[in-house]
Image (cartoon, rainbow, N blue to C red):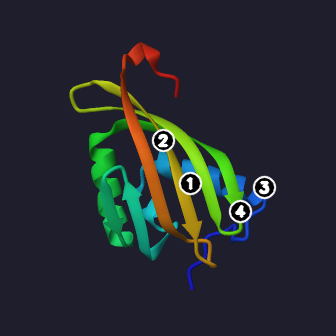
């Protein structure tokens, strides 16, 4: 059985480890590696998209990082309890025309007993920025 440590129930320390692990993985932009943190039957809402299962996660992330160039993400633990974690985040990227963006958002995560994320609900807003305004 696949396991992704740390496992729930979360303490502040293990919740922060889970958040940092997610940040590091997403910044790798390796859609296969990232997808292994999610259960085979994971359910996502990402903006207005509904994504079901690890294969759809892989496809979504591959597409994301093919269009969101020079992607850089920062996540912050917001709250946690038992098998759930809430984070806030920001990330920056540019599109194929060179326009830079900063995205702000919140995610609610729910994990199974093996530490795999079974639910991810993300609300995200994008802001156009100048390259000189980048922070990340």
The foreground one among 32 and 12 is 12
The residue that appears at 28% across and 24% down in the rendered structure is: 99
Q: According to the image, label 2 marks what residue? A: 105
Task: Please rate how many residues cluster around mark 3, counting C-alpha atoms within 10 Å: few if below 14, some from 14 to 19, many from 20.
Answer: few
Between disc 4 and disc 3, the foreground one is 4
Residue that protrudes farthest toward the left in the picture = 97
Q: Secondary structure at mark 1?
A: helix
Residue that protrudes farthest toward the bottom in the picture = 1
Q: According to the image, label 3 marks what residue? A: 13
Is mark 3 in CB contact (under 8 Å) with mark 1? Answer: no
Measure the alpha-carbon separation of dots 3 and 2. 22 Å
Between disc 3 and disc 2, the foreground one is 2
Q: Secondary structure at mark 2?
A: strand
Left or right, 81 with respect to 63, comes to: right
Q: Position of residue 79 (x, y in %)?
A: 68, 52
Is mark 3 in CB contact (under 8 Å) with mark 2? Answer: no
Residue 121 vertical placement versus 82 (above, below): above
The foreground one among 95 and 11 is 11
The residue that appears at 52% across and 66% down in the rendered structure is: 37
Q: According to the image, label 4 marks what residue? A: 81
Q: According to the image, label 1 marks what residue? A: 22
Task: Please rate how many residues cluster around mark 4, counting C-alpha atoms within 10 Å: few if below 14, some from 14 to 19, many from 20.
Answer: some
């Amino acid at each position: 059985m696949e396991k992704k440590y740390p496992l729930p129930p979360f303490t502040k320390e293990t919740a922060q480890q889970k958040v940092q692990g997610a940040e590091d993985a997403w910044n790798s932009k390796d859609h296969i590696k990232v997808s292994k943190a999610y259960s085979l039957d994971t359910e996502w809402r990402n903006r207005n998209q509904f994504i079901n299962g690890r294969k759809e996660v892989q496809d979504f992330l591959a597409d994301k990082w093919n269009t969101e160039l020079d992607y850089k993400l920062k996540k912050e633990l917001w709250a946690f309890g038992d098998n759930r974690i809430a984070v806030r985040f920001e990330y920056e990227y540019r599109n194929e025309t060179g326009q830079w963006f900063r995205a702000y958002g919140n995610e609610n995560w729910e994990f199974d007993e093996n530490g795999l994320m079974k639910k991810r609900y993300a609300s995200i807003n994008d802001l156009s920025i100048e390259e000189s305004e980048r922070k990340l």
